[in-house]
Image (tube, helix red, strand yellow):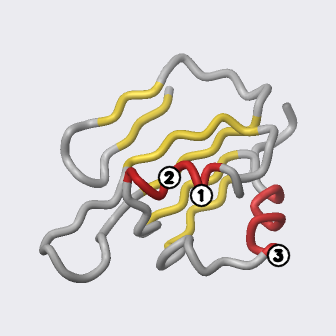
């Protein structure tokens, strides 16, 4: 492989993104999206929008209070064909590792 394009993006929520956003993700070989604000119950809806040809992992956002939106959340996508050994998700917020 001659090179690898990596995208790291604070997306400030995934619920309101348009088609151009989702298609634009294909530009990168490895995609790391932070501040997705996607809770566990909304993950399947978002997962269906993510481009095919990637292996996707998520750390769900959590609500700190009963009211308001969830905070945090991360999504990691690695293009199929890029060799990895495994994924480790830490219990702490904001930690995800893929080797």
Going 76% across and 54% down the picture, which residue do you hit? Answer: 28
Question: As rendered, which of 28 and 62 lies closer to the eye?
Answer: 62
Residue annotated with mark 2: 43
Q: Pointer 3: what residue?
A: 20
For label 2, the SS is: helix
Q: Secondary structure at mark 1?
A: helix
Disc 1 residue crowd, few under 14, some 14–19, many 20+, Cα 10 Å: few
Q: Residues within 10 Å of mark 3 (few under 14, many from 20)?
A: few
Distance between the alpha carbons at the discs numbered 3 and 1: 15 Å
- As rendered, which of 18 and 72 lies closer to the eye? 18
Task: Mark 3 or mark 1: name the one nearer the start of the chain.
Answer: 3
Q: Percent position (x, y) of residue 78?
A: 66, 39
Q: Quadrant of the N terminus?
A: top right
Give how far across and how far down residue 63 sits, in percent.
Answer: 22, 67
User: Closer to the camera: disc 3 or disc 2?
Assistant: 2
Q: Is residue 82 above or below residue 68?
A: above
Tag of residue 46: 1
Marks 3 and 2, the one that precedes in the sequence: 3
Residue at the (47%, 79%) spot, across then down: 12
């Amino acid at each position: 492989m001659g090179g690898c394009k990596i995208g790291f993006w604070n997306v400030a929520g995934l619920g309101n993104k348009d088609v151009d956003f989702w298609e634009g993700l294909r530009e990168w070989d490895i995609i790391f999206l932070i501040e997705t604000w996607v809770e566990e119950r909304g993950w399947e809806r978002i997962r269906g929008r993510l481009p095919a040809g990637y292996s996707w992992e998520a750390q769900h956002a959590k609500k700190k209070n009963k009211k308001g939106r969830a905070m945090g959340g991360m999504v990691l996508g690695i293009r199929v064909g890029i060799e990895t050994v495994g994924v480790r998700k830490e219990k702490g917020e904001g930690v995800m590792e893929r080797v």
